[in-house]
Image (cartoon, rainbow, N blue to C red):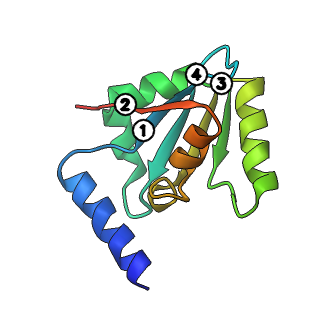
């Protein structure tokens, strides 16, 4: 329960200070970058249309994995394989991105370069 409350507060604080949950993934033989978007379920989808960096990332991708279940190492391996095959936009709940067991950290531990894209 404490983790859920903390995650919710962090997400709300990040949105309030205009931090965006958009990341570029490079390295480990990727020919072109893939991207991760941390979604906030209460955020209207139309807000993404006002973020030029998101629109650019979306246009560069050839496939989409939205709200993909990463509950096992097999699922994480499937995500890595998808990103190797073609530039991919991955959309996960923002709470799944952060922390020691978050997606961003797991990709970095696997040798990928994951950088947050600053948005205006």
Q: CA distance from mark 3 to mark 2?
A: 16 Å
Q: Position of residue 15 (x, y in %)?
A: 26, 53
**Circle 1 residues within 10 Å: few <14, some 14–19, many ≥20:** many
Mark 3 sits on what residue? Answer: 87
- The mark nearer the N terminus, 1 or 3, is 1
- The mark nearer the N terminus, 1 or 4, is 1
Q: CA distance from mark 2 to mark 1?
A: 6 Å
**Above or below: residue 16 compared with residue 77:** below
**Circle 2 residues within 10 Å: few <14, some 14–19, many ≥20:** some
Disc 1 and disc 3 in contact, CB within 8 angstroms: no
- The mark nearer the N terminus, 2 or 1, is 1
- Give left or right: position of 40 versus 66: left
Mark 1 sits on what residue? Answer: 22
**Above or below: residue 67 compared with residue 110:** below
Circle 2: element type: loop
Mark 4 sits on what residue? Answer: 33
Q: CA distance from mark 1 to mark 4?
A: 13 Å
Q: Position of residue 18 (x, y in %)?
A: 21, 45
Disc 3 and disc 4 in contact, CB within 8 angstroms: yes
Q: Position of residue 64 (x, y in %)?
A: 66, 38
Circle 4: element type: loop
Q: CA distance from mark 3 to mark 4?
A: 6 Å
| Foreground of the two, 89 or 97 | 97
- Give left or right: position of 36 versus 4: right
């Amino acid at each position: 329960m404490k983790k859920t409350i903390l995650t919710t507060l962090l997400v709300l604080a990040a949105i309030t200070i205009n931090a965006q949950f958009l990341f570029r993934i490079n390295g480990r033989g990727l020919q072109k970058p893939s991207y991760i978007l941390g979604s906030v379920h209460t955020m209207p989808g139309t807000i993404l249309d006002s973020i030029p960096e998101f629109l650019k990332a979306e246009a560069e991708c050839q496939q989409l994995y939205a709200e993909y279940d990463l509950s096992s190492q097999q699922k994480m391996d499937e995500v890595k394989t998808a990103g190797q095959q073609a530039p991919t936009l991955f959309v996960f709940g923002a709470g799944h991105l952060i922390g020691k067991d978050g997606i961003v950290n797991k990709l970095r531990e696997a040798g990928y370069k994951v950088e947050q894209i600053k948005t205006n």
